[in-house]
Structure formats: C-alpha cells, structure tokens
Amino acid sequence: MSNIYCKKDSTLTDNEKAVFNAHLAREGLSGNVWDVFEEWVKLSTSKVNFFYVKVFNKDELIGMGLFLKIKPFDLRTSNVKFRKNPIINKVFSIISILGNTCVCISFRNLITSNLTRPFFFCKPDLEAEIMKAILTYLKNDKEADMVSIVDTSVNQPHYQNAGFDIFPSSSEAFFDAEKYSDISEYLNEHRSLKKNLKRKQNEIITQVYKGAVSKSDLEQIKECLLTSIDESRVNTPSQKFFEDNIFDTQVYNSDKYVHIFIRVDNKIVGFHTYHVSGSNMGGVLGGFIRNRSRKAFAYERVIVASLDYAIKNKLKYVQYSLVDNFTKLRLVDSLEPCGLYFYARNPINRKAFKYMFKSSDMYALYLLEQQGLAK
C-alpha cells in the first residue's frame, strides 16, 4: 500500500469504532474497551495529552494506536533510586525541568487496564504495515524527543525494523480462567494459600461490588492507594496525573467496573478495580495498606476473588498487568513475555536512556521476575 498515512486525533466516532469490531471479536473484547481511554483523552492537559494515532489508506481508516505525550518528562517518576535519594531526587528534578523533554508512550506503559495491546487493525494481515506507519509517525513527531512502548515480545521484529532499541521488561501476568470449573480446583493447586485464607475468616470479609462507590469507601480506598504508591516498586511516567484524576472518572461512579474490597474489622485494607470487556477482565487500579493487609492476606484474597468472579461469569482471561511482585508471579497461571521498545532521535538521549535503564523501575521488575522464576 502506497497511500498509507497517519493522523493524530482526540476523538473516536462510533463509525470509526465499528471499523475495529472484527479486531475486538478476535481479541474477545466488547465495545466498552474504549471507555477508559476515552475518559483520559477528555482529561488531557498541555503537559499530559492522551491521543489516538489513526492510520488511513487513502480515506479509509485501517488501523489505530493509543498513546499519550508527556512534557516535561520527569526522570524521577520511573526510577526508584532517583525518588528515594533526597539529593539525587533534587538534582534530577532540576534536570527534568531544564531539559523540558517530551516523551510519547503507549497506553500500555501505564500498567493499567491492559485488556489489549495499544494497536488495533481492521484486518490482521495489515498489522505489519499499520505498525510500521504508526512507529514511523511517532519517530517523526517533532514535538516528541523520545518514544517508549511496552509491548509483547512476539512483536519485537516490528520495532527492530523501525529502528527502536530493545530493553527487557517483566512479563504480563494473567489467569486463563477457562482452566477451572470452580475456584476450589485452583486452591487445590495452592495448598499453602488455601490454608492461609482460612485464617480469621470471621474478621475478614471479601466483597465483590459493582456500582458507584460510597463516599466512605472511596476515602478508604484512596488511603490504600496512597499507601501503596509510597511503597511501590514502580511508578508510571504520568503517575501524579493518574493519581490526581482517576477518581474524577467514571471508574468509581458507574456500574461498568467490578471492585473487590478486603475488609478487616469493617475497614477496607486492600482493593482492586477491574474493567470487564467481552470475555476479558483487566485490572485498572489497586492498593493495599500493607501493615494491616499482609496478615489478612488481602492481596492473595483479591487475586482469588477475581479468578472466582471470572469462573462464575464465564470469562476467559483475568489480566494482571506486568509482574511487579513475587506474590503475583507465584499465584498467576500464565505469563506473556514483554519488552520495552525505545527510540530517540538525539544520540545523547539514546545513550542517557541506555545508561540509566539499569537503575529504572522497569529493569527492577525484570530482575524481580527472573529471580522469582529461578527459585
């Protein structure tokens, strides 16, 4: 095809969504897969801008990608060593402001609601051409100094052909819920987990909830989230923006999402929210007050409850995003290898990224997974 071109856009019409109905069907998704991204597009600012890259053949829409642009890019957000050291934190804060660097990242980089890759194709045999067009468009974006995309490793050749550098990432963790006819089958495979979950049942309640979250519960899950952020091994490039705006979306104001709350003495000590689309269930956000939730095995209870919900509702997959802790790695039953694909026009930026990558959150997650698999 010689008439392929890309266009950046901030809206997606119903007719344009319909172009990808066959793609959604192949992925086992329904039309509500667009909901989360559409909400973030509406919340875009000059510093954090969500957008669609649409691919056309002449005037026919044939492909699309979901991305966001961040400027200035805070070098500290994805590097725990920069965040935790007060002196280095201050130095890189100044460097980030003075550098005023702009980065384009895929929606998947946010490690949230990973129901699908950030690319959509009207026909599977056009994938190579559509990805080439999108990657070329992003590379040529004069506003973007860097492009960073998390994607499944099987697609690595697309990035190699486009001239992207390749860095390791932890795998995407998920459950294949169709393996089980009942949650007891899963628990019988994890005897120690089964034993732990029987402890103090009278004090611990697992609640699966749909609908708008009450003001009282909302304050409690905010506390769980803020505590988790402080202790987290990974922050996303738009972490602060995500924290400041997630509760203004419909995620906690509608019945489109499934929430799992773990209550100890009637107080929420851990939670996870999911987006259900077609036969898939993807994690959107979670948080735990670890000094209270650890003894209650709240994280484990959330994982079990999500799989139980998927089994009972005939769902196929429960997506848990990238491996970021040993418990997730131990309890999920499936892994999809991923990579981090990076491009920068400026050779200084390329060298700087390569030099700093081994102190980054992403590399730390990769090492964590390798360590866990080696046990």
Image (cartoon, rainbow, N blue to C red):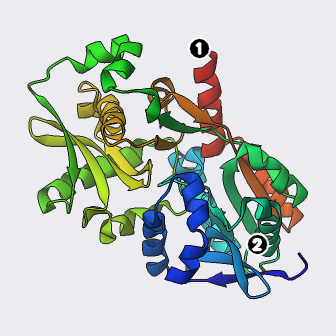
- Name above or below for residue 285 compared with residue 44: above
Lower position in the chain sequence, tag 2 or tag 1: 2
Which disc number belongs to residue 375? Answer: 1
Give the Cα distance between marks 2 and 1.
Answer: 40 Å
The residue lying toward the viewer, choosing from 225 and 259, is: 259
Q: Residue at 21% across / 50% down in the picture?
A: 209
- Name above or below for residue 357 compared with residue 52: above
Where, quadrant-wise, is the C terminus in this rendering? top right
Task: Determine which quarter of the picture holds residue 51.
Answer: bottom right
Q: Residue at 39% across / 54% down in the picture?
A: 276
Total marks placed: 2
The residue lying toward the viewer, choosing from 247 and 135, is: 135
Is residue 169 visible to us here? yes
Badge 2: residue crowd in 10 Å (few <14, some 14–19, many ≥20): many
Q: Residue at 86% across / 67% down in the picture?
A: 346
Is residue 324 visible to us here? no
* Label 2–label 1 contact, CB within 8 A: no
Badge 1: residue crowd in 10 Å (few <14, some 14–19, many ≥20): few
Task: Determine which quarter of the picture holds residue 55.
Answer: bottom right
For label 2, the SS is helix
In the image, is 145 to the left or to the right of 361?
Answer: right
Amino acid residing under circle 2: Leu
Quickly name the residue at label 2: 138
Where, quadrant-wise, is the N terminus in this rendering? bottom right
Question: Residue 291's spot in the image, x, y percent?
Answer: 27, 32
Q: Residue at 29% across / 35% down in the picture?
A: 305
